[in-house]
Amino acid sequence: MKYSEYSKEQLLEEKKKLESQYNRIKAKGLKLDMSRGKPGTDQLAVSNGLLDAITSKDWDNNAGDHSLEYLNYGLLTGIKECKRIFADLLKVQTDNVIVCGNSSLNLMFDYITQCMMTGSDGIPWKDQGKIKFLCPCPGYDRHFAIAEYYGMELIPVRLTGHGPDMDQVEALIKDPSVKGMFCVPKYSNPTGETYSPETVERIAAMTPAAPDFRIIWDNAYIIHDLTEKCDELVNIFDVLKKYGNEDMVIEFSSTSKISFPGAGVAVIAASDRNIEIIKKRLSVQTIGYDKVNQYRHVKFYKDVDGIKRHMKLHRKILAPKFKAVIDEFENGLGEYGVAEWTKPNGGYFISLNVMPGTAKRVYTLCKDGGVTLTQVGATFPYGIDPEDKNIRIAPSYPPVDELLAATRLLCICVRLAAVEKLLGE
């Protein structure tokens, strides 16, 4: 029976029961954290072999053409072996790949800075008046933070379960002050959805009023599958060629959730024209990235198939955690009609929508009960969820027993907040 069908007397009785359950758990003094999507210690351990992948013998003078070159300045776009692995993973040519340091977020910030200061390919954005950016929602808070940092106007775009609402996008890009859009096209953060072939086609076919419009194609979860039935994302660069729009998309990815988040390898993939513009900027910005770390990853993974085998180890760790959370949602929320949640085939998050107007209350109840969640509103521009309903769930870091405890408390808090709202409290 759904809470919306309860009488007032039934709601009051349910509230009394939930408060009792909540107080018993609160008395345990829990300190559990489901706020950030970072790998757990068990995931980090599967990459420990990276630390032993290279030795001093790799740098003997007779070890090959890399022996001294990779220790010195130069090779601005990365070492050829690492470029090849990423080119195979992203399904682009090696000449269209630049391998950099450990942070794709750093690369995205630098690219937006380039657009602001010198232009994506023309007049600097800062010289063109008010700049607007499209933000599919719920989305990634750090994307929004980059645009906010430069004073852009952030425009929310609804996600449909198959990517952004393209009717809305196609209407908005008629405004020449709209200069770009953030996208997490596979296992989107936090909804877990993958853009459909139809959505990718419509994105690639767009004709924005701004000729310097750019899409930040943040392919962070390109190979982060949780099930055998993994989602397939169409390679947007193949589609862009049909419409002569190769320059419209800049793709980013990294090994941050493949190897070590703090010591991985990040990459840019782009058209010939964009690669040349980015290289011109990088030639001033740096003399070269950490090629030893790039080579370490090559020695450890060897090729793209090695990365795929490695990600199966991650899946064995992550899949039970996601299942534990979703099973608890089914058991603790399913019959009450007060919440909906995604069941992603990959990525790092579950998107939980609670009764509108109660997400902040759920957050506070959980915090007081010993469970830290992602700040409500973080998945929307300016930190404002207009319906106060979305909560990003990050199951990756805690062990399963802690996840179960945290999710059980969360379910009680969701129900309690819903009952309070229905009672008009």
Image (spheres, rainbow, N blue to C red):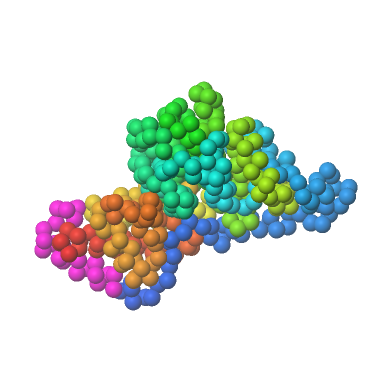
- Magenta residues? 1-23
Q: Quadrant of the C terminus?
A: bottom left
Quarter of the figure with residue 270: top right
Give percent across and percent down for residue 378.
39, 55
Instruction: Report if residue 270 is visible in the image.
Output: yes
Which residue shows up at 37% across the image and 55% down it? 383
Residue 11 in magenta stretch: yes
Relative to 25, does residue 116 appear above or below in the rendering?
A: above
> Residue 76, image x and y in percent?
71, 44
Q: Nearer the viewer, residue 40 or 199?
A: 199
Which residue is found at the position 14% from the left and 53% from the top? 5
Left/right placement of residue 354 relative to residue 300 reads: left
In the shown orientation, is residue 11 left or right of residue 197? Answer: left
Q: Main secondary structure of the magenta part?
A: helix
Estimate the x, y position of residue 183 in percent, counting from the top left: 46, 41
Query: Residue at 37% across / 44% down in the picture?
Result: 155
